[in-house]
């Protein structure tokens, strides 16, 4: 029982947030209207958006492989990416990020400690770009006046983070010496954190290699451009009056909603973020929920196809990889 309560401290807050938001959503929407919206949507636009969703995943494989300096094959990178997203959709604690670093280290010569920092850098830039998209959209959304301050605060925090990363990338020796100094009286922290810091600094090579940085930025911006177009098409399928600003606002909200602690797959938080953003623009929460459900469907479908294929060819299962990751975390 004691062990259960200790573990619950990690997953209970996110589960509570998800359950509360699901209850709020069901109370705010007219389910028959949501079903009707799904039935009456522009299915031609949804089909195009589906192809773009698949394209987004393929380009994201190029993004990650660029950070890995093209050392793994594209196939290994892409399959592992799909496996990671599949794990995030069904396993707790966002184990998909840890999982894809672990799986790629098993199928290539790259070490786990060299792979994980690239995922951290990728996520940091995702946050930076999503903040920029959200801030840009907010300035055009009159109904969302109350969100400007929060958006700029988020943007400021993200900008500060990238400045810090840039400084660390160019002052690695100083960073290691500083860490050693402040942890001198805590040997265990110094031993465990020192190795992690070294690998993180190694992963920041994107800040020191100009050509690598430009290639990474190009593919990352291209990847997010696909996401904006895809989101805009999905929203327009339900709201014909929608513009690209609607797509940017919904995408930015979805990105931050997915980062909130929740049940696996951002259940509840994703729907609340997208639904809330589109409700501000349309005053139609029921149809906005239909948009969120389609976004979730695409997320699950394409990452699921790639992830399940990868697990099947490698003889893995979700439960099996979960046990491996738990053992790996205990022994690391």
Image (cartoon, grey):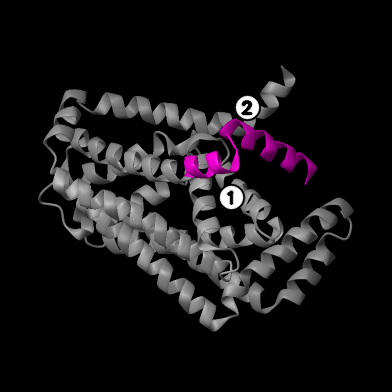
State yes or no: residue 265 in magenta: no
Viewer-closest of 28 and 79: 79
Predominant secondary structure, magenta span: helix
Point out residue 50 in the picture as x, y percentages from the top left corner.
27, 48
Point out residue 168 in the picture as x, y percentages from the top left corner.
66, 72
Report whether residue 146 is seen: no
- The residue sitting at 55% across, 43% down in the picture is 313
Q: Residue furthest front?
A: 313
Q: Name the side, left or right, on which 159 lies relative to 42.
A: right
How far apart are the two marked residues, 2 and 1, measured between alpha carbons?
25 Å
Point out residue 126 in the picture as x, y percentages from the top left corner.
45, 60
Viewer-closest of 233 and 286: 233
State yes or no: residue 317 in magenta: yes
Q: Secondary structure at mark 1?
A: helix
Quadrant of residue 161 within the rendered picture: bottom right
Q: Earlier in the sequence, mark 2 or mark 1?
A: 2
């Amino acid at each position: 029982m004691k062990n259960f309560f200790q573990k619950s401290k990690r997953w209970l807050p996110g589960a509570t947030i998800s359950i509360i938001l699901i209850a709020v959503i069901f109370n705010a929407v007219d389910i028959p209207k949501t079903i009707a919206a799904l039935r009456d949507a522009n299915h031609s636009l949804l089909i195009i958006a589906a192809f773009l969703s698949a394209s987004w995943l393929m380009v994201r494989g190029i993004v990650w492989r660029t950070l890995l300096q093209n050392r793994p094959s594209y196939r290994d990178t892409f399959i592992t990416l799909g496996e990671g997203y599949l794990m995030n959709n069904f396993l707790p604690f966002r184990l998909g990020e840890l999982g894809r670093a672990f799986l790629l280290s098993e199928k290539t010569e790259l070490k786990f400690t060299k792979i994980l920092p690239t995922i951290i850098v990728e996520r940091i830039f995702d946050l930076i770009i999503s903040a920029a998209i959200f801030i840009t959209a907010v300035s055009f959304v009159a109904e969302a006046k109350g969100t400007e301050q929060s958006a700029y605060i988020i943007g400021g925090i993200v900008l500060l983070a990238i400045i810090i990363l840039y400084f660390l990338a160019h002052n690695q020796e100083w960073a290691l010496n500083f860490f050693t100094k402040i942890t001198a009286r805590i040997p265990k922290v110094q031993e465990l954190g020192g190795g992690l810091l070294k690998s993180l600094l190694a992963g920041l090579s994107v800040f020191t290699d100009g050509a690598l940085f430009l290639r990474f930025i190009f593919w990352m911006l291209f990847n997010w451009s696909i996401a904006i177009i895809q989101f805009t098409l999905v929203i327009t399928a339900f709201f014909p009056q929608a513009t690209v600003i609607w797509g940017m606002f919904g995408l930015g909200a979805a990105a931050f909603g997915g980062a909130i602690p929740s049940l696996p797959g951002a259940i509840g938080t994703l729907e609340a973020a997208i639904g809330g953003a589109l409700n501000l623009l349309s005053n139609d929460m029921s149809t906005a929920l239909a948009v969120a459900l389609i976004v979730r469907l695409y997320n699950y479908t394409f990452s699921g196809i790639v992830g399940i294929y990868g697990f099947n060819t490698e003889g893995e299962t979700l439960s099996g990889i979960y046990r491996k990751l738990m053992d790996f975390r205990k022994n690391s």
